[in-house]
Amino acid sequence: MNKIEIKPGIYWVGGIDWHIQDFHGYKTHRGTTYNAYLIIDEKVVLVDTVKHYLYGEMLARIKEIIDPSKIDYVVSNHVEMDHSGSLPKILEEAPNATLITSVQGEKGLRRHYKRDWNFHVAQSGEELSIGKRTLVFVHVPMVHWPDSMVTYIPEENLLLPNDAFGQHIASAERFDDEIEWGVLKEATATYYANIVMPYGTQVGKALEALGGLDIDMIAPSHGIIWRSRIPDILAEYVKWANHETEARALIVYDTMWGSTERIAYALAEGLSEADVPVTVRSLKNTHISDVMTDLITSKLILIGSPTINNGMLPSMGGFLTYLKGLRPKDRLGFAFGSFGWGGQAAGEIEKFMKDMGWEVPIEYVNLKFVPDTEELGNVKSIGKELGKILG
Amino acid sequence: MDKYRCTVCGYLYDPKKGDPDNDIEPGIEFSDLPDDWTCPLCGASKDQFEME
């Protein structure tokens, strides 16, 4: 196994999960990695671990570099099991190691593993000298769990931010200049949209706290390490944290017998005539976590469902539950649907949008059974009108 | 006694229980918490709470 040295004396010792496609409900088309880092100094430090089933890979990588029993400190920046899952085994290999984590980190790790490890709870801003280098621990609560912490090494200008700046990409490459930027940007956007988006305010605070630091490498806990594209990705993070979008439209719908789909396409036609770039996603074919990648850049969100048994389709109910949790702000919304009788779905979707704090400039459209040519013409006009409002 | 929920992380402040992590005794109304009190889970400030 080749040693992967990211800075002199600092090694990537993570695991590559080529096969994972479902990350607690988030579709990970490209797999992922769990990144752990080994720092060789007067003290030996392991920062984070890997998901339990890749422990062997991490251990083998560590053994290429040093006898694991020589590890003095293990830093757990985040309790979630994809990063903490190998703690029990590595702490058996390194029984004298101190486990450094945040206040909530200790509570969380005790609840997960029921072990009385040799904990050291780091306060935010606490520094630890490990020889030539210093570790600085900064709490970043809710980026993206209460326990979340980052580790900064000032002598190396190296930030180890755990899940922040991460992406689900399994690859042979480790650095941002070794992989195509469009792929990397999209994977980072998808990750932000599905994992970090609810906590824009907290991301803003974290960026502020980290703003004064000299950083020339950001090594997250998933995917590619940043060294050449740091200004680019910081700029994207600022935009996402502020819920800044583009003048684009996203249409998300599901359909029973094709009527709601026809309305969706009529809206798309009207929007196109108003020169608005529009993306059309059917929940039958597009995973909800992929819809979020489109949603993160779109200002105008059009959502449609037929009514079934006095409510919306369950696929739409699931999507809206997911969307509610991710809390996208500052959007324009428009609801639509079709029905045979009852017809509650479109109104429910519009109410959802208003409850989310979105602006709804035009009242919903709800058409009985199969829309006719005139009705579709009117829907197209609404699309055009929405396009004009979007500007 | 009204309960207040943190809009950031979902923590629920229940006056009947207080907030032992921040040395807040049971029986303290949310409005009577100090201005610099923060969510014991995620550190959000008081203005980020909403009444349940």
Image: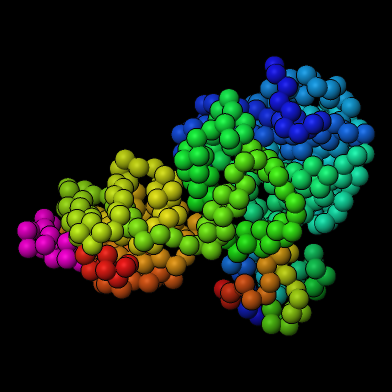
Magenta residues: mostly which secondary structure? Answer: helix
Residue A258's x, y, as percent?
Answer: 17, 48
The answer to whether residue A267 of the structure is visible from this angle is no
Q: Is residue A61 magenta?
A: no
Residue B45's x, y, as percent?
Answer: 68, 72
The answer to whether residue A149 of the structure is visible from this angle is yes
Q: Quadrant of residue A364?
A: bottom left
Rendered residue at 43%/48% (across/down) = A293
Rendered residue at 80%/45% (across/down) = A153
Q: Viewer-proximal residue, A81 or A11?
A: A11
Q: Is residue A369 magenta?
A: yes
Rendered residue at 75%/51% (across/down) = A214
Left or right of A197: which side holds A369?
left
Q: Viewer-proximal residue, A273 or A343?
A: A273
Instruction: Tell me how the rendering is colored.
Output: rainbow
Count of numbered tags: 0
Residue A113's x, y, as percent?
Answer: 75, 39
Furthest-left residue in this view: A373
Extent of the magenta region: A367-383
Furthest-bottom residue in this view: B32
Residue A133's x, y, as percent?
Answer: 87, 41
Q: Viewer-proximal residue, A380 or A208?
A: A208
The N terminus of chain B lies in quadrant: bottom right
Left or right of A205: which side holds A335?
left
Q: Is residue B49 above or below residue A165?
A: below
Q: Quadrant of residue A98?
A: top right
Rendered residue at 71%/26% (across/down) = A4
The C terminus of chain B lies in quadrant: bottom right
